């Protein structure tokens, strides 16, 4: 087989496989599921630790801070009733 014909066949085979690969890649990116955004964390420092000069840093989402505040209020109401 002549050298020019061999190079032409390799070129055609290579471009065909690249086209198939790019089509397959386009299909996978089009079908990729949309990732949900992570909720933003809110960090607060607490200096209520007895015996330490180092403040404690706590990071939670907005919903977690609201839940913690509701739990704290509930505990205060219960302790006042006793």
Image (cartoon, rainbow, N blue to C red):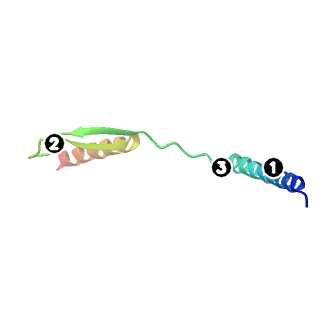
3 or 1: mark nearer the eye: 1
Q: Quadrant of the N terminus?
A: bottom right
SS of the residue under disc 2: loop
Mark 1 neighbour density, 10 Å: few (under 14) some (14–19) many (20 or more): few
Mark 2 neighbour density, 10 Å: few (under 14) some (14–19) many (20 or more): few
Q: Which residue is mark 2?
A: 54
Residue 26 shown left or right of residue 81 in the figure: right
SS of the residue under disc 3: loop
Q: Earlier in the sequence, mark 2 or mark 3?
A: 3
1 or 2: mark nearer the eye: 1
Residue 27 shown left or right of residue 65 in the figure: right
Residue 54 location (% of width, % of height): 16, 42
Cα distance in 3D space between marks 3 and 1 = 26 Å
Cα distance in 3D space between marks 2 and 3 = 45 Å
Q: Which residue is mark 3?
A: 32
Residues at circles 2 and 3 in contact by the CB criterion of under 8 Å: no
Query: Which residue is at the far front?
Result: 2
Query: Which residue is at the far left?
Result: 51
Residue at x 70%, y 49% (from the top left corner): 31
Residue 4 location (% of width, % of height): 88, 52
Residue 8 location (% of width, % of height): 87, 51
Query: Which residue is at the far bottom?
Result: 1
Residue at x 18%, y 45% (from the top left corner): 80
Q: Earlier in the sequence, mark 1 or mark 2?
A: 1
Which of these two is toward me, 18 or 48?
Answer: 18
Residues at circles 1 and 2 in contact by the CB criterion of under 8 Å: no
SS of the residue under disc 1: helix
Q: Which residue is mark 1?
A: 15
Cα distance in 3D space between marks 1 and 2 = 64 Å
């Amino acid at each position: 087989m002549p050298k020019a014909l061999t190079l032409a066949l390799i070129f055609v085979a290579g471009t065909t496989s690249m086209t198939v690969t790019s089509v397959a890649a386009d299909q996978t990116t089009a079908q990729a599921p949309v990732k949900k955004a992570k909720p933003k964390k809110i960090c607060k420092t607490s200096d209520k630790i007895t015996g330490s000069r180092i403040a404690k840093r706590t990071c939670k989402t907005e919903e977690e801070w609201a839940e913690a505040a509701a739990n704290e209020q509930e505990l205060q109401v219960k302790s006042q009733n006793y």
